[in-house]
Amino acid sequence: MLSFPLWGVRRAILPHLVDDVLFINPTGTYEGKAEIQQHLQGLANDGLSFELSEFKDQDGRVSYAYKVLINGQVVEEGTGGLTIVKNGKIVVDGTETTEPKQ
């Protein structure tokens, strides 16, 4: 299991995003590094953190279980987390139900 505050997510993932990356989550759809960084900063200010586990990679389509916490309290959890990676960079992050149709 990976567990980290949101500021750690920003620092860890921003260098690994394509310029036109797409993030889809319950608060909206965000496109591009700058917009995503701004969105993540706002969430970090609210005490948001993640716990991710049960990773499964199928040709760059990484699914996982997740918990979203605010100030240590679980506010959402599920098993349909999804990150799509192409050429070593994240192109989409969301859930299996929000995956864009190709």
Image: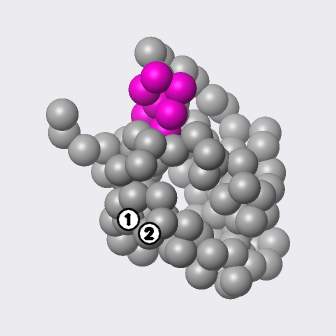
The mark total stands at 2
What amino acid type should be assigned to the residue bearing mark 1?
Tyr
What amino acid type should be assigned to the residue bearing mark 2?
Glu
Circle 2 residues within 10 Å: few <14, some 14–19, many ≥20:
some
85 vs 97, left or right, is right
Q: Which mark is residue 98?
A: none
Q: Is 95 contained in the magenta span?
A: no
Cα distance between the residues tagged 2 and 1: 6 Å
Q: Position of residue 1 (x, y in %)?
A: 78, 39
Q: Secondary structure at mark 2?
A: helix
Q: Is 87 contained in the magenta span?
A: yes
The image quadrant of residue 52 is top right
Q: Residue at x 35, y 50 (%)?
A: 20
Disc 2 versus disc 1: nearer the observer? 2
Q: Position of residue 100 (x, y in %)?
A: 25, 44
For the record, the magenta segment spans 84-90
Residue situated in front as seen by the camera: 7 or 16: 16
Q: Residue at x 58, y 40 (%)?
A: 16
Q: Is residue 45 visible?
A: yes
* In the rendered image, the vertical position of residue 27 relative to residue 51, given as above or below: below
Q: Secondary structure at mark 1?
A: strand
Identify residue for label 1: 30
State the quadrant of the C terminus: top left
* In the rendered image, the vertical position of residue 34 relative to residue 14, given as above or below: below
Instruction: Give the dominant element type of the magenta stretch: helix, strand or loop.
Output: strand
Circle 1 residues within 10 Å: few <14, some 14–19, many ≥20:
some
Identify residue for label 2: 35
Q: Disc 2, disc 1: CB below 8 Å?
A: yes
* In the rendered image, the vertical position of residue 94 relative to residue 49, given as above or below: above
Residue situated in front as seen by the camera: 49 or 86: 86
Q: Position of residue 13 (x, y in %)?
A: 64, 48
Q: Residue at x 47, y 30 (%)?
A: 85
